[in-house]
Image (tube, helix red, strand yellow):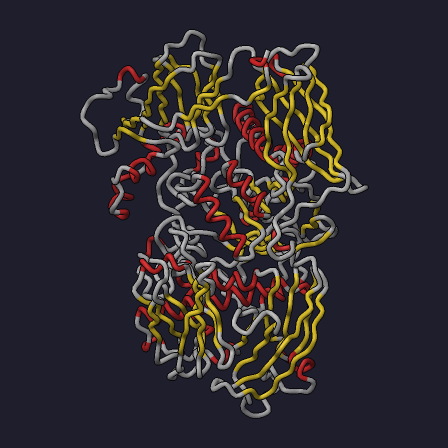
Amino acid sequence: MNARGLVRPTRQSLSEGWSMRRTEPGRYASPAEIDWGGPLGPFDLDGVCVPATVASALRAAGRLEDEDAALVALGDLDRSDFWWRTEFAAPGEPAELHFDGLATESQVWLNGERLLESSNMFAPTRLRLPEGLDRTAELVIVFRGLGELLARKKPRARWRTRLVRERGLRWARTSLFGRMPSWCPPVAPVGPWGTIECRSSRAGALVVERAGVNASISSDGAGEIEVVCTIRGTAREEDRFWIDVEGARHPLTLGPGPDGTLSARGVARVPGVEQWWPHTHLSDGATPRRYSVALVHTESETAEFRVDLDPLGFRTIQRAPGERFALVVNGERIFCRGTCWTPIDAFALHADEAPLRTALTRVRDAGANMLRVTGTVAYESDAFYRICDELGILVWQDFMFATLDYPVDDDAFFESVRSEVDAVLDRLQGRACIAVLCGSSEGEQQPAMLGLAPEDRASRFFDDWLPKRCAARRPDVPFWSSTPSGGELPFHTRVGTSHYFGVGAYLRPYEDVAVSRPAFATECLAFSNPPGVTGADTTPEERIPRDRGSEWNFRDVTRHYRSALFANVREEDLDAETETALERAALANVMETTTALLRDPALDCGGALVLAHRDPWRCAGWGVLGHDGAPKSSWYALARAWAPVAVSISDDGLNGVRVHVTNDRPEVLTDRLFVALMRVDGTIVESSEVQLEVPPRGHFSGSVDALIGSFVDSSHAYRFGPPAFDVAIARLSSIGRCTGREAIHVPRERGRLDRATLGLTAAWDVDRVGDSLALIIHTESFAQFLTVEAGEAAVSDNFFHLAPGFPRRIAIDPDGRRACESIRVEAVNGLDGLDVRWPEGASA
């Protein structure tokens, strides 16, 4: 009797022992023609592990150690066929092969017989194994070059895009990543980039093929879980099925399902649920509330079987009313901030759970609460969404469509994307992190910029079919047709969503955000960000991102803002290292200042997502993290502006310098706010301390003149003689003297402060119990854009101003001791720096 119990399929990973061979496109029709034992060419490998692409497999084999030469040698991978072969032990019971991603035009052979074809890298496919299969089975997959597809004559598109060179890519359901010149490696993803498994189940068992769950909150505050579970097998009259939520069971009704399966359906009601929140809106140290969920099958009083599902979070998400775009989570409007996610591994487009967790934990710790998975790359793994659920990170999810005029009226193409959409919605069911489902990236902007009228760029698929499909499968998630969208033209900023590059590519001053007033920037703040903390940037020109066809690139954009902020530094006085140091400092300033302005409730902006998260290769790219995940100056600055409790200072013109305190936490922020106007030598000209009570998820704003209690011309707008002070400081007192919950404003017209001997000193604060290290840094004279260079060791903050009498405590990972002999502390206006040796006994 026990053999019948409810089970998940047994999963056998087919990850090891693959061989790869490169052949001319179309030369071989079947694997029998391939000489698997012959001499290996430069693109042939044995002992390959999957998931992998051609490029990631070659890198793992040490073939791409010289990256520049390797990229030239790889050439156009779309112009070759790649054959992959392995053998596996057939399970001897009913089984299927599951392919989670084959890129892209592929054919699958089992024991020499072609049984499956796939032309969509985003749609999973499965192959039921024939009965009586030999114990050792041969599996071969060929990935055909896209050359024939791209060259094939097809109906003309309504518009062209500059994003990719190959117009025929609109017919291919494959990633544009690797095919977009100028901002990612020119290496197309080809190969089994998703997992491959053999899934089997014992004869007679009831096998859970799909467990679809959606969680919602009713008007009376109860949680509701709608369950649709597909089961393969034969049920008996005495079988009972339940959904178990935190130990409370709710019955499911069994009925016929598709393709001869069974369907177990029901609704579980959980009174008074605790809501899931983004981590920024929880108490400090709290984690998002999720409820344990399981399917339970009882055959008799003594025979019971349990299949655990991923925990569920209950929350509500809606669009805020009005033309401007904002999200309301659990009845609270929130400011969404974060980045446009880029894959950890640009060659593989796949990452294991451990590096994903490390990367996403860094996102949470930086104060970001949203990531956008853009339509130019690929859907992320189940582990990505599961960890975002766990950590409280919202996800703006694009479908994988971008700028092209996709032939969705073609029957075969539509059927392919229908299966893709359904598979994605299946995977995303029950994920509390999913905040928006978006039809495409720039699918409306591109034709509008080329002059097409709204009726000429309309699409029944994106305007009607896709939103209805999403509403049916995820009614709890807002749908947005494309980004940017809304307004008189899709890319106008004050309505809907925009890709806001006024500050950035279009060289506008910081104050442009108050003029353009972006409602929600799903992309913004794109610059060529030099990697590292110190040293000259050596990125070759061909790796600097640029808009295709433009005469300028994003290094020119960075240099513009460096010149604007440090206008008093002559170009002829810049060596390469100083120039890069000032670029890093300027980008820290523009990122922190602009994000703080966008976060001010007076601007009524719903969110800002920086382009981009991580560089796809070694370069000074859009990424605020390097290709190795190391933070850049922009990352540190954004973390200060993103913090759940944040302090900022803005220049409000004739209204003086203004202090802002934002509190996203659910508790009242009771604190004392200290403000001071200071000279660079540490002399405090004016100061005041006031008691604050910032409401939960609230904001305080006040001018320095009002806080001090008299007119001090804090912005030096009236110019009655020379300024009496150099910098303005705002600090929350109860946070502690060294932790840095403060903002320091240096007027932009001051440029680089006069270089001087700063008198930097530092002392170690060692917590032997927690095995943590921190460096407490002091200065005798104002230090502008101070940096802490600790090699590969993680530091808690960088590129900040340090005022005399206001020491800073910088946490440093003790494991980093092996990366450098000493730590270097210096500032852009300092004639002196400081080398600090690791303390005795620190981890090596």
Q: Nearest the camera: 831 or 89?
A: 89
Q: Is residue 690 left or right of residue 719?
A: right
- Compared with 810, 567 (above or below) is below
- Compared with 309, 820 (above or below) is below
Placement of the C terminus among the 4 image quadrants: bottom left
Placement of the N terminus among the 4 image quadrants: top right
- Residue 115, horizontal then vertical, whole percent: 42, 15
Q: Is residue 303 left or right of residue 636?
A: right
- Compared with 467, 141 (above or below) is above
Going 66% across and 77% down the picture, which residue do you hit?
A: 703
Q: Specify the farthest residue to the bottom.
A: 721
Any part of residue 552 in sight: no
Q: Quadrant of residue 22?
A: top left
Q: Nearest the camera: 222 or 433?
A: 222
Going 38% across and 69% down the picture, which residue do you hit?
A: 581
Q: Nearest the camera: 182 or 293?
A: 293
Q: Quadrant of residue 646?
A: bottom right
- Residue 162, horizontal then vertical, whole percent: 45, 46
- Residue 718, horizontal then vertical, whole percent: 61, 86
Q: Is residue 687 left or right of residue 624?
A: right
Q: Specify the farthest residue to the right.
A: 220
Going 38% across and 51% down the picture, which residue do you hit?
A: 627
- Residue 693, horizontal then vertical, whole percent: 71, 69
- Compared with 607, 263 (above or below) is above
